[in-house]
């Protein structure tokens, strides 16, 4: 039965890995919906301001707390600023912060985890530093870092880039520990598998063993922490903004909108619902994309 | 009696005329046991503790023993997957005990390994083609088209279709996976292959196929094997000489025909008598030597002869003095004070010639 297909397959038809991954990914309904929703959010945030031309900072006191209308599709806040315009502008920042901080924490966490798991000599040192970071009280630490560096960075790189880099950095270096722990555990298990011994007996160099045999096999937990990391980063940024340590108050982000809206929840509940919905949808769609990618990257689940 | 074995040994002796390829002297591998807050070493597991043997070119040396006796560790130390604690390993007369870095990598080209668990020894995320081709890429032997061709050739050599190169290991059966593992071991044209229980994880119906493939390859490519197994019948079939290991030491080493016909060490006798015979009448009639107790811990081996705690013929002397390694017959070495003392030996029923 299966013989037939082997015989029919042309010799050395080079199946590219990414083509296979894409074919499998296409069959994952949740992931496709996730891609759709996420693409919609990204496009809206990038192109929206050109279609909906109201300045998010423009105060229209007469129209304050306005309900949904044609001129203000999502209503206005207590100062008469257009909610849709603020959402679109805030989304850019939130998404950018979420992604960059996630990438930074992922690279750090994976790096530390792989090094600690694979090289026994580094294990003690790296994992104890991980514990150290985990034990640090985060918010006070963030406060101190931001107080110390905000003004210097602002002066050097301009108010927005400076604070953006600072926030991404701060979130990144305070959220890699979980990833590092999970990855280390996984690497410890993979390292003892026979195919790693086999690679060593072949004479494969250590860094190639890590890159070719260890890393691809710890993809699943990395994917999961990546998708959770985005949500975490967006929410931490909100908390920072709420404390007045993030972006300046007139600079909308989803987290900031959410916190500002919370005071007016009884008057205009929409001010909480929209940013909350945007954050949830982003996190959910990224989660599904991560799920789909993880399954598609595993040949055993790919089922081609 | 003494003249008879000489005739049976004739072919084996002519084999042994080939030069020595691998020589192991007093090889030991101790794994430290760490305890406590400060990870102090409180003892060591003496997995391999003073092993001596030679493997001649184009020969198959069988290494048998119970699980946990150190046979796999011995194989891995010889391939330098573990660093030896003591002793000397020579490959083609050259000491490879403390070769490191690039020279060790170069050495790996001529020594390869076939693993026990074909499920676990293939990276699930790599295609068969890249698994088999990995050694070639790593050592810069072949690239591009030449690499593809060589991989096809290797897959054909182990009886697989070259069309499988784009598939993943999970799409294959156990026997096919083991063939992939063998193809990988052959890729660099090694002279010496350690087969670490290559058939233990396979179906009985597939075992013979894989063993025949190994023998076939040996003939065609002039390979030398160290064949580690606990399957006595299979070792008898494939090996020219057999070494019996107990608790980190070799207790008996002899040409395989002779060892199976007339084991001299009481442990070997017990081991032989544990293997079932394929004649039901004989099987029902034969007497078995049933050893009492468990294998002692290799972290704390008994004094004197390591087998004395379970040996049916042990004397007080056995727990005091370690038996020396004696050559009782040409090519038949044994470590037992009373080996050859026929009256003392527990009798075992002759199992007849293999079918």
Image (spheres, coloured by chain):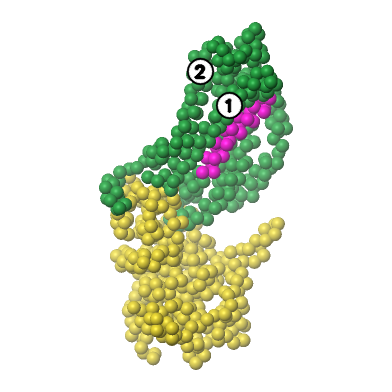
Chain colours: A green, B yellow
Residue at image x 55%, y 86%? B313
Q: Position of residue B30 (x, y in %)?
A: 58, 66
Q: Is residue B9 above or below residue A275?
A: below
Q: Chain of mark 2?
A: A
Q: Which residue is mark 2?
A: A48
Q: Which residue is mark 1?
A: A277
Seen from this angle, which residue lies furthest top? A62
Q: Quadrant of residue B56?
A: bottom left
The reply to whether residue A175 is in sight is: yes
Left or right of B22 on screen, residue B297:
right
Q: Position of residue A300 (x, y in %)?
A: 43, 48
Residue B188 or A102: which is nearer the viewer?
A102
Residue B100 or B62: which is nearer the viewer?
B62
Q: Position of residue B247 (x, y in %)?
A: 55, 73
| Same chain, labels 1 and 2 | yes
Left or right of A180 on screen, residue B167:
left
The numbered mark, 1 or 2, whose residue comes first in the sequence reads 2
Residue A229 or B64: which is nearer the viewer?
A229
Q: Chain of mark 1?
A: A
The reply to whether residue A257 is in sight is: no
Q: How many labels sit on residues?
A: 2
Q: Quadrant of residue B298?
A: bottom right
Residue at image x 31%, y 52%? A2
């Amino acid at each position: 039965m299966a013989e037939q297909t082997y015989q029919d397959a042309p010799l050395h038809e080079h199946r590219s890995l990414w083509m296979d991954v894409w074919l499998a990914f296409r069959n994952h309904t949740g992931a496709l919906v996730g891609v759709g929703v996420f693409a919609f959010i990204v496009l809206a945030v990038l192109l929206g301001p050109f279609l909906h031309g109201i300045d998010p900072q423009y105060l229209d006191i007469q129209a304050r707390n306005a309900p949904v209308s044609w001129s203000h599709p999502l209503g206005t806040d207590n100062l008469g600023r257009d909610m849709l315009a603020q959402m679109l502008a805030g989304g850019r920042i939130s998404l950018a912060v979420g992604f960059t901080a996630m990438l930074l924490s992922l690279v750090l966490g994976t790096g530390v985890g792989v090094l600690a798991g694979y090289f026994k000599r580094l294990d003690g040192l790296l994992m104890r530093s991980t514990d150290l970071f985990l034990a640090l009280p985060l918010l006070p630490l963030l406060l101190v870092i931001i107080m110390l560096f905000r003004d210097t960075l602002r002066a050097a790189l301009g108010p927005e880039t400076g604070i953006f880099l600072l926030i991404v950095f701060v979130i990144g270096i305070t959220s890699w520990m979980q990833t590092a722990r999970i990855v280390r555990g996984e690497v410890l298990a993979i390292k003892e598998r026979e195919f790693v011994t086999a690679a060593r007996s072949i004479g494969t160099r250590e860094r190639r063993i890590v890159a070719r045999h260890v890393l691809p096999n710890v993809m699943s937990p990395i994917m999961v922490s990546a998708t959770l990391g985005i949500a975490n980063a967006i929410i931490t940024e909100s908390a920072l903004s709420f404390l007045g340590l993030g972006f300046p108050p007139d600079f909308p982000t989803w987290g900031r909108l959410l916190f500002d809206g919370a005071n007016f929840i009884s008057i205009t509940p929409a001010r909480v619902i929209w940013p909350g919905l945007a954050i949830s949808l982003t996190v959910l769609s990224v989660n599904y994309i991560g799920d789909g990618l993880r399954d598609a990257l595993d040949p055993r689940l790919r089922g081609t | 009696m003494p003249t008879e074995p000489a005739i049976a040994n004739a072919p084996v002796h002519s084999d042994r005329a080939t030069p020595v390829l691998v020589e192991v002297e007093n090889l030991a591998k101790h794994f430290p046991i760490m305890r406590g807050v400060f990870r102090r070493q409180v003892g060591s597991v003496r997995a391999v503790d003073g092993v001596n043997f030679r493997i001649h070119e184009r020969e198959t040396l069988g290494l048998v023993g119970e699980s946990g006796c150190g046979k796999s560790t011995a194989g891995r130390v010889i391939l330098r997957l573990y660093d030896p604690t003591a002793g000397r390993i020579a490959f083609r007369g050259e000491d490879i005990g403390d070769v490191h870095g690039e020279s060790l990598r170069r050495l790996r080209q001529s020594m390869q390994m076939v693993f026990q668990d074909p499920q676990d020894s293939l990276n699930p995320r790599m295609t068969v083609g890249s698994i088999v081709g990995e050694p070639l890429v790593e050592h810069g032997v072949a690239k591009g088209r030449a690499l593809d061709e060589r991989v096809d050739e290797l897959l054909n050599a182990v009886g697989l279709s070259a069309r499988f190169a784009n598939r993943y290991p999970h799409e294959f059966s156990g026997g096919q996976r083991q063939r992939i593992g063998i193809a990988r071991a052959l890729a660099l044209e090694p002279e010496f292959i350690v087969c670490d229980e290559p058939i233990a994880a396979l179906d009985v119906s597939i075992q013979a196929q894989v063993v025949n493939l190994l023998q076939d390859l040996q003939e065609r490519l002039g390979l030398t094997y160290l064949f580690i197994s606990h399957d006595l019948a299979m070792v008898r079939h494939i090996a020219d000489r057999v070494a019996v290991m107990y608790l980190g030491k070799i207790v008996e080493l002899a040409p395989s025909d002779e060892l199976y016909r007339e084991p001299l060490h009481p442990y070997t006798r017990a081991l032989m008598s544990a293997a079932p015979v394929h004649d039901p009448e004989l099987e029902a009639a034969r007497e078995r030597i049933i050893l009492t107790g468990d294998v002692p811990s290799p972290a704390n081996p008994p004094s004197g002869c390591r087998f004395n705690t379970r040996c049916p013929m042990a004397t007080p002397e056995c727990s005091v003095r370690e038996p020396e390694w004696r050559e009782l017959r040409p090519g038949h070495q044994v470590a037992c004070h009373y080996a050859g003392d026929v009256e003392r030996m527990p009798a075992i029923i002759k199992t007849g010639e293999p079918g």
